[in-house]
Image (cartoon, rainbow, N blue to C red):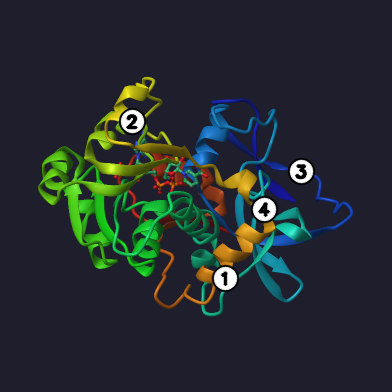
Amino acid sequence: MQAWVQEKFGGPLTLKAVEDPTPGPGEVVLQVEAVGLNFADHLLRLGAYLARLHPPFIPGMEVVGRVGERRYAALIGQGGLAERVAVPEAALLPVPEGLSPEEAAAYPVSFLTAYLALRRAGARPGESVLVQAAAGALGTAAVQVAKALGLKVVAAASRPEKLALPERLGADLTAPYEELPERVKALGGVDLVLEVRGKAIEESLTLLKPKGRLVYIGAAEGEVVPIPPLRLMRKNLAVVGFWLAPLMGERPLVEEALGFLLPRLGKELKPVVGRVFPFAEAEAAFQALLDRSHTGKIVVRL
Ligand SMILES: NC(=O)c1ccc[n+]([C@@H]2O[C@H](COP(=O)([O-])OP(=O)(O)OC[C@H]3O[C@@H](n4cnc5c(N)ncnc54)[C@H](OP(=O)(O)O)[C@@H]3O)[C@@H](O)[C@H]2O)c1
């Protein structure tokens, strides 16, 4: 079968003929239809992700495909950018009715992260949340899930032209990053921040109300200076880390998240698909993820 292979960290992808996957005990082979690209796939290719793979490997952690006539989504550590991939049966996720393969590829990572990160923050109806990178894959999911949970949403992005999308999805207030401090201070602060920029964490802490909580989900703009604990004491703030991958092993937690998400997906929660690239253009799909002008989820279609 054909697969895109990462031969060395930081290098290009190579399209190669590789052996078909052989399913181990408890595994099935998925005929891949679509791959959702994540910022984490980019970090994995650089060798800069929390989980480190050793090249050569096939990137692609979020796939949609068929086993016989049935369509599934799956979160896997690697292997998605191929015609077929072996997946543990336990990692298969249902595809809500009415979602196209592209839409289905835009739901697992982003919507599970949005729900579980808000849960980790102890979000309560009526509270306010700041969603950064709000036009991106996680951002568009977080805006919608937060609204469905009864939160007020402040959506922010690097460029003003990216803000129409989160506004359409229900954000109560939008702002480009440079106007954020002024706009949020006028509100009296926010209760929660979903931090995905990293470098902004110092500023984000100033935007929190007393007893506010910041969930550290990502550092797309780069890692930060250490946070002085006194900063947290002064306003009784909490900073909690969030990483979806290990939480996927906690069945009751995942069941709870799916119980909330699946009946709503395709209805009030709509996975936002950005650009769709053919399999032959996987490297261009990564470039689109990095040029920071995309909205929604970038998907590679087989
Ligand atoms: N911890 C977890 O389990 C978990 C799960 C899912 C996602 N994440 C994190 O959430 C963030 C969003 O991930 P995603 O996969 O959904 O991607 P995405 O939001 O579709 O794209 C990344 C977004 O990050 C912003 N960004 C900031 N600096 C960037 C840079 N140097 N290059 C590219 N984009 C940059 C961009 O929005 P602006 O231009 O508007 O800033 C861009 O839209 C990432 O930090 C990712 O690591 C973490």
- The image's mark for residue 259 is 1
Q: How many C-alpha atoms fall within 10 Å of the one at disc 4: few (<14), some, or many (≥20)?
A: few
State how far apart marks 3 and 4 are (Cα).
33 Å
Which residue sits at x=51%, y=74%? 99
Q: Secondary structure at mark 1?
A: helix
Amino acid type, callout 2: Leu
State how far apart marks 2 and 1 are (Cα).
34 Å
Q: Secondary structure at mark 4?
A: loop
Circle nearer the N terminus (2, 1): 2
Q: How many C-alpha atoms fall within 10 Å of the one at disc 2: few (<14), some, or many (≥20)?
A: some
Q: Is residue 146 above or below residue 218?
A: below
Residue 90 position within the rendered picture, expressed as x and y whole percent measured from the top left? 75, 59
- The image's mark for residue 18 is 3
Check the picture and name the quadrant holding the C terminus.
Answer: bottom right
Describe residue 186's horizontal placement relative to residue 110 as left or right: left
Q: Which dot, 2 or 4, sits closer to the camera?
A: 2
Q: Is residue 224 above or below residue 294?
A: above
Which residue sits at x=71%, y=74%? 70
**Disc 2 marks which residue?**
232
Residue 153 position within the rendered picture, expressed as x and y whole percent measured from the top left? 27, 58
Which residue sits at x=69%, y=41%? 16
Q: Is residue 53 above or below residue 164?
A: above
**Quadrant of the rendered structure where residue 168 is?**
bottom left
Amino acid type, callout 1: Gly
Residue 96 position within the rendered picture, expressed as x and y whole percent measured from the top left? 56, 74
**Disc 4 marks which residue?**
250
